[in-house]
Amino acid sequence: IIIMDEDFKFGEHQALYDTCMSLKYSCTSYSNFDIQDIADKRMRVDLTQDDNICKIIFNNDYRIQQFQQFIRPDEYAYSHAYVNLGLVNDSHEIHVDAPIPNQVMTMLIYSNTEWELNHGGETVFYEEDRKELVYLNPYKPGRICLFDGSIPHCAKPQALIGPKYRFTIAVKFCRIDG
């Protein structure tokens, strides 16, 4: 699990948040049934590489160099991206993004511009058997979290005292079969 803070300039971070606020979300039935029999309903919007969000993330040479230290372009290729819209009292199942290690790398970007520690919404990572917590990643504005998609994880609910919406940009990179 790799954490990168302050990789977005203020204007970039604000543009990520503003774009997340303006997207048209729908309740999706995206599921991980093929991996683990979990029905995953959430407010979500899929992105294309031409979306403003992807342009902000990937049109920065320094940031790309940082990413490539952990997501090697000769091993992984961009697959898809989406934005999750979290609401107070949402319940999220512990899940994986890939059934076996080193198949998918996941990048989460916390795009809210304001968030306090007591607002909740952390991403929790678990042991493979999902019984023990391994790492609690606080939702910190602008934070980038990179991890192997086979690590069980989930988002914790946000508190009523925090912002109404919790935006998380998820970007997936799949292993290149060689």
Image: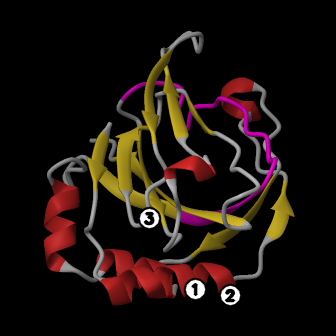
Q: In the rendered view, would you say 148 is above or below 47?
A: above
The label on residue 62 is: none
Evaluate if marks 1 and 2 touch, with contact meaning CB atoms under 8 Å apart.
Answer: yes
Residue 175 covered by magenta stretch: no
- What x and y, as percent, mark residue 74? 19, 52
- Between circles 3 and 2, the one closer to the viewer is 3
Residue closer to the observer: 21 or 80: 21
Horizontal side of 63 relative to 157 (left or right) equals left
Residue closer to the observer: 67 or 77: 67
Q: Amino acid at mark 3?
A: Pro
- What x and y, as percent, mark residue 125? 49, 29
Q: In the rendered view, would you say 111 is above or below 60?
A: above
SS class of the residue under badge 2? helix
SS class of the residue under badge 1? helix
- Between circles 3 and 1, the one closer to the viewer is 3
Q: Please provide the residue range marked out in magenta.
A: 81-101
Q: Quadrant of the N terminus?
A: top left
- Asked if residue 101 shows in the view, the reply is yes
Mark-to-mark CA distance, 3 and 2:
18 Å
Residue at the spot 13% in from the left edge and 65% down from the top edge: 65
Q: Which residue is mark 3?
A: 141
Residue at the spot 52% in from the left edge and 58% down from the top edge: 116
Q: Residues within 10 Å of mark 3 (few under 14, many from 20)?
A: many
- What x and y, as percent, mark residue 139? 49, 52
Mark-to-mark CA distance, 3 and 1:
15 Å
Residue at the spot 67% in from the left edge and 67% down from the top edge: 163
Q: Which residue is mark 2?
A: 22
Q: Amino acid at mark 1?
A: Thr
Q: Which residue is mark 1?
A: 19
Q: Residues within 10 Å of mark 1 (few under 14, many from 20)?
A: some
Residue 154, picture quadrant: top right
